[in-house]
Image (spheres, rainbow, N blue to C red):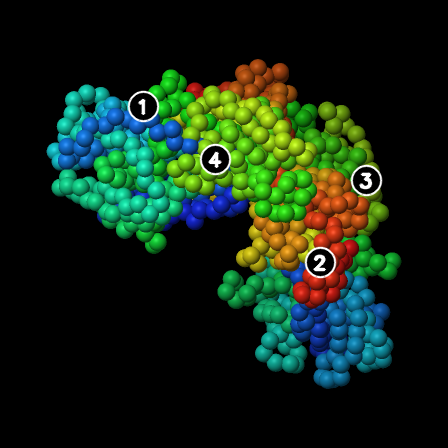
Amino acid sequence: MRPLRFLLPVLAAAALTGNAPAMETLRQYLPAAGPSPTPAAAAPAEPVVAPDAAPEPTAAPLKAPEANGQLPVVRVNVASQSFNFSQPWRKNTPTLRQGLGVVLMDGRILVTAQLVTDHTYVELEKPETALKAAAEVEVVDYDANLALLRAPAADFLQSIPGARLDESVSVGDRVEVIQIEPTGAPLRTPATITTIEVGPYPVDENAFLVYKLSFPLQQRENSFTVPAFKDGRLVGLVMRYDPRTQTGDLVPSPVINQFLQAAGTEPYAGFPRAGLTFADTRDPQLRAYARLPNGKGGAYITKVLPGSPAETAGVKVGDVLLQVDGRAIDQDGNYEDERFGKISLAHYISTALQPGKTIPIVVWRDGEETTLEGTLVPRDRSSMTSQPYLFDTAPDYVIVGGLVFSELSRQFLREWGPRWANEAPLKLVYLDRYQSELPDDRGRIVFVSSVLPVPGTLGYEDLSYEIVEEFNGQPVRSLEDIAKAADSPTDKFHRIKLAEDPGLVILDVEGSKQAEERIKAEYGIPAMRQLGNRN
Amino acid sequence: MPQLFRFCLLSSLALAAATAAPEPSASMVRISTTSQQPDYAVPWNPGSVVSGVGAGFVISGKRIMTNAHVVSNATFITVAKEGDPTPWEARVLHVAHDCDLALLEVYDETFFEGTKPLDFGGIPELESTVIAYGYPIGGDRLSVTRGIVSRIDFQPYSHSEVDSHLTIQIDAAINPGNSGGPVMQDGKVVGVAFQGYSGAVAQNVGYMIPTPVVRRFLKDVEDGAYDRYMDLAATYFPLLNPAQREALGLEDEDTGVLVGSIFDGGSSDGKLQSGDVILAVDGRKVFADGKIELDGERVEMAEIFERKFKGDTVELEILRDGAKDKTTLELDRPWPFEMQGRAYDRRPRFVLVGGLLFQPLNRDFLDAQRNDPQKKVDTRLRYFFDYYVTDHLYREHPEVVVLSDVLKDPVNTYVEPFKGSIVDKINGQDIRSLQDVAAAFSQPGEFHVIELLGEGRPVILDRATLAEAGERIKARYRVISEQNL
């Protein structure tokens, strides 16, 4: 097992790709600046796939006071400590990240989720006085890369005005990216919005609205995330910057707006998803095959995720999506947005609509239009075979007689560093990437993640990443299955059936029990099980 | 990489008679070859023509022994005797790519007049001196280098990349051009020089094929055809864990190996089961570490199979569900392994339709894809190659057919993004071999519908426009042939 390699917040950015499946995109973070860059534990290279779904800004503006000359920003210092997925009983070296948070009208502070990933302590610092106060992370959405903080002391932010969200910027507009000098004075960098499109977000295969900016960002501390304003209104938070091309990506105000609305419900509602992928219908031969008249537009449905709103609505692979909620869909899967013009349907579904809303969907099927109804709900990550990310929670594991069992997640694969897709065990990468092709009842994939040699593991030292099929005759679909089966052996042996060679591993039940104290003492492992963070 | 290596170890250390070594000039042959390397990227291309020089030596029966890699893909071979510049045309009589040996014959047998066939000896002792003869870089005449036997061990044979056999390491300089030359001790051939490391990796490390491997090859071809090495076509694992031994009902402390996977159509198919314990092979006890005792030496169990030939039987004593049983296997070479090895003397197989190139997945193809930055080898393709045998993917896909390239033309201009995908169905027909592709395209209908694994959108080709495109594409891209099945 290779040690965890952090992704340094080096100044490099994503070469964003359209909807080419399996295209690898290296995404990195903003400069942490200062003498030594601060490691940011989080998402390395990710495959970018066609957007699952889509958005629009309903822009219910937060009523903000007029700016009194002071910027609605506060320094946010975060100590964080990521979990080690190869040795799930321990955490990695703590790191510090510093960024800027935007003070909202209601006194909460908006930051990127990247800033608070795996946080152990979050602190607010007033730019001019350096007065500090501890803060709580109230809501975090790693898909949308946004988080809300709350300062426990109500009067801490009193002198700082709240920010309102921008609702008007368009391509070509000039905005200001704000950093804070060590003196507390603002450093304003003018930036131009060059493109507004749906693009990939840092974790998983998420695609939401992105504003692309062209600007020369200065190296300063507190730059892990920085806000951009126009006429005193928040345009977005910079989540990526490439110093080579001097371009950056913003989490824009429409996504922030949707996040704030979702954060207003209990529990956090999240962003609606359709659960489908589509391809363009520019190919006249495909159009002819689908008997799709020219001028009808339409996006060809290539995948419908099991249990998704699209599936519930009856959408099928091979349907051509013509209309969603009354919006005509063109041959690229775009619709005409009132504000942004042609933009991906993914934006409409994820950001314009509210979760729980039922919408009409018109598809072209067997040469005619069919109207379906779908109710959009957020994605249920917990039902996935391999979770796209796991932050802020200790990885689960079960140790039986020195064999460490783990569940497959992309977070585990990321232990192999930015090139994990090429360097992590191929079969696990394959199962993660193509998990939607697995049978619906596959459950989780449990495998032997490491062996802690004790006398009982003699001859098993070379086991590595073998997937477990059965434990004591019981099918294994989760770590709980292992725990349960290990608690009820049928005789004096644990029989572990592996999907791969050597096929069968046997442990002595009594010996495994006795080994526990030794493992605790000699390997410094506090517990034989960690199953507390099931979601 | 889940590939199977066959294992064999030295059986015995034969002592060579201590007589003076005669100069083998009268037996040495310099082999010049012209060969054509198959082009897996543009498979209808004849391939680039390259020439090479290797060594060989005369053995009994008017035959010349050399390495398989000296004469692989050869289109024209000449041989010349040491000290005589006359080239004589020769041809390959037998070639064994799995152990890198070949036998040549000369069209005009008068070539052999005045030559002296060499005899084979046994396995030289460690630290004993051997002499290598060949035509390495640095001159045209015979080169002689002296070295000692450094190691007798089991090594991969790089020619096929999937085979391993007994190998002898010597510290004589062995360079390209030495290949196929004899390594002698006491007047007898004790090995055939065949591989080494580039100077950047290691110096004074050369490898020769020892005589047990050579003798096996010679015996195998006695019936006029080479059948290759035999294999159990099953994986097995040491049984060193006490709990595992007890649970499986093994009484003593040092017998038995656990059977893991069994591959369809192989020698063990229907005879062994996953979870069986092999206790003995041909009456010889199998130790828990997978070794057996043979001629007083502890060697890998596979040595038994290595020494056998196609159709030979092997008797296994097994333990299944706690009960002892016996089973007799007839040895054969299982087919699923070949796809992961390198192929020689064969033209790449392909089908080209409407500029869409279909090729079967195999090692040579994958290397060609990897060497071309414009092509992609995605996770699915890597998985299908690496796990083809271990995950029994050959059951569903006797051949994994890949849409490997698109020769751009108006008819296929939207197909480009699907390059590198595995073909699942064409016109509703399952594609399980390259032949299926050719057959499926002959189905009637308005469109050709190509379904690719993992791609929700089919590739559609209009049949009418496709017909016109065929000739246009052939002419523009100089396609000599539209298929090689």
Same subunit, labels 2 and 4: the answer reads: no
> Is residue A415 or residue B68 the one in the foreground?
A415
Q: How far apart in space, not on screen, are marks 3 and 1 (Cα)?
A: 68 Å
Q: Position of residue B452 (x, y in %)?
A: 66, 43
Circle 1 sits in a helix, a strand or a loop, which is it?
strand
Q: Which residue is mark 1?
A: A138
Q: Which label belongs to residue B329? A: 3
Nearer the observer: mark 2 or 1; the answer is 2
Circle 2 sits in a helix, a strand or a loop, which is it?
helix
Residue at point 48%, 35% (across, down)? A346
Residue B339 appears in the figure: no
Q: Position of residue B351 (x, y in %)?
A: 73, 55
Q: Which residue is mark 2?
A: B469
Q: Is residue A306 above or below residue B355?
A: above
Q: Could you classify mark 3 by the number of other residues whose Cα lies within 10 Å: few (under 14), some (14-19), or many (20 or more)?
A: some
Circle 3 sits in a helix, a strand or a loop, which is it?
strand
Q: Which residue is mark 4?
A: A346
Q: Which label belongs to residue A228? A: none
Q: How far apart in space, not on screen, are marks 1 and 4 (Cα)?
A: 27 Å
Q: Tell me which label, 1 or 4, sits earlier in the chain.
A: 1
Q: Is residue B114 above or below residue A247?
A: below
Q: Callout 1: residue from which chain?
A: A
In this picture, residue A45 sits left or right of residue B169: left
Rendered image quadrant of residue A502: top right
Q: Is residue B254 above or below residue B434?
A: above
Q: Callout 3: residue from which chain?
A: B
